[in-house]
Every structure is written in structure tokens, then in C-alpha cells.
Amino acid sequence: MAAFKRSSELLNIGGSIDLVDGTPASVTINLPLSTLDREVFVVTDVQMDTERIFAPAAPGVNIITYSVNKTKESVLSIADSNCISTGGVNIEHTAGGQMVIQQFRTPDESSTGVSADYLTVVATPNFELAGSYATTAGGTANKSVFVRLTGFRAVASADLYAALVTEELNQ
């Protein structure tokens, strides 16, 4: 018997967070899961985007970082097993007038959306979008981060469901 059985077609679940300069934040995004039926969300793809951030007018740094997590409410790296995806943009204006722009998002691949091909499994009925935005000057306009998780609902075996929920809640 398979560890989980697909119970829906592909779904797109979206959300966003509004970040205030200098104040880390997170938001909980609900998943359409039935815990009584041991449903899990099998994530096949993640897309993330931010509002454009601009280079600082004077020497300094503008940086926005973000992550989609199973349960944790802070920005994580992909090395943390609770992290589904992470990304960020760092724009530095050096004293010599040079601009340095670094941008990353991990994972940067997509899956096919079939049962044997997925990025992760979320067993709790929600996930977290966490972010942080900071500028050297401070007090700039808020910036938003957007996420879309694509995946499908599946019914997990009792032992797998118990293990997945326990792992997520104990991280």
C-alpha cells in the first residue's frame, strides 16, 4: 500500500505579506485539508515574488528576505527542514558609487506534479510566509512578498500522517 493516495487535482494556494521597513513579520496561510481524513498537502511547485526594491540613493543597503515554512514564523534557509522555499534581494550602493545586486530563490526547479515527484509534504492545515525588509535609510514604504504553492491533497496512511505531523510540530 502506498504511503499516501492523491485525493485532488493540482491546486494553487496563494498568499502575501506586507513588510514594514525594519520589522520582520509572518503570516499564516490556510490549506484546504481535513485532519480527520489524514489529508496532507503535497507541494509540487513554489513561486515567489516581491515588489521591486530600489537601490539606496546614498551608500547603503536595501535587503528583503523571505521564506515559506511548514510551521516556523521566521525567515529560514533551505538547510532547515521546516523551510519549503526561500529567497531574497540585496541591493548595495557602495561608497565608490558601485551597485551590487544579489538575488536568489531556492529551490529554483519545478516538478511534474505527479505523485512520485514533489518538493515536500505539509501535514498541518496551514503554512507560514515569513519575511524581513530593511534599508539603511529606514522609514521607506512597505514592500510585499507573494507566494503561490502548487500541489495536491492526499490521504496519508495513519503511521505516515502521525510521523509527518509530529515532525512538523516538533521542529
Image: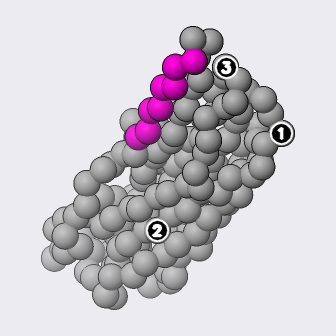
Q: Please give the name of the residue rendered at 43% of the width and 68% of the height, measured from the top-left corner.
A: 149
Which residue type does callout 1 highlight? Gly
Residue furthest to the right? 139
Q: Please give the name of the residue rendered at 49% of the width and 80% of the height, measured from the top-left corner.
A: 33
**Distance Cα–Cα, label 3 vs label 2:** 34 Å
Q: Quadrant of the N terminus?
A: bottom left
Question: Taking 123 as reference, is 42 left or right?
Answer: left
Question: In front: mark 2 or mark 1?
Answer: 1
Q: Is residue 82 above or below residue 152?
A: above
Asked where in the image residue 57 lies, by quadrant, the reply is: top right
Which residue type does callout 2 highlight? Arg
Q: Please give the name of the residue rendered at 23% of the width and 73% of the height, measured from the top-left corner.
A: 113
Picture coordinates of residue 97, whole percent (x, y) = 57, 18
Please give the residue where the numbered disc 3 appears in the rendered image: 59
Please give the residue where the numbered disc 1 appears in the rendered image: 139
Question: Taking 51 as reference, is 143 left or right?
Answer: right
Asked where in the image residue 158 lies, by quadrant, the reply is: bottom left
Looking at the rendering, the stretch of residues picked out in magenta corresponds to 97-104
Indicate the secondary structure of the residue bearing disc 1.
Answer: loop
Which residue type does callout 3 highlight? Pro
Q: Is residue 155 above or below residue 146?
A: below
**Distance Cα–Cα, label 3 vs label 1:** 16 Å
Residue 92: assigned label = none
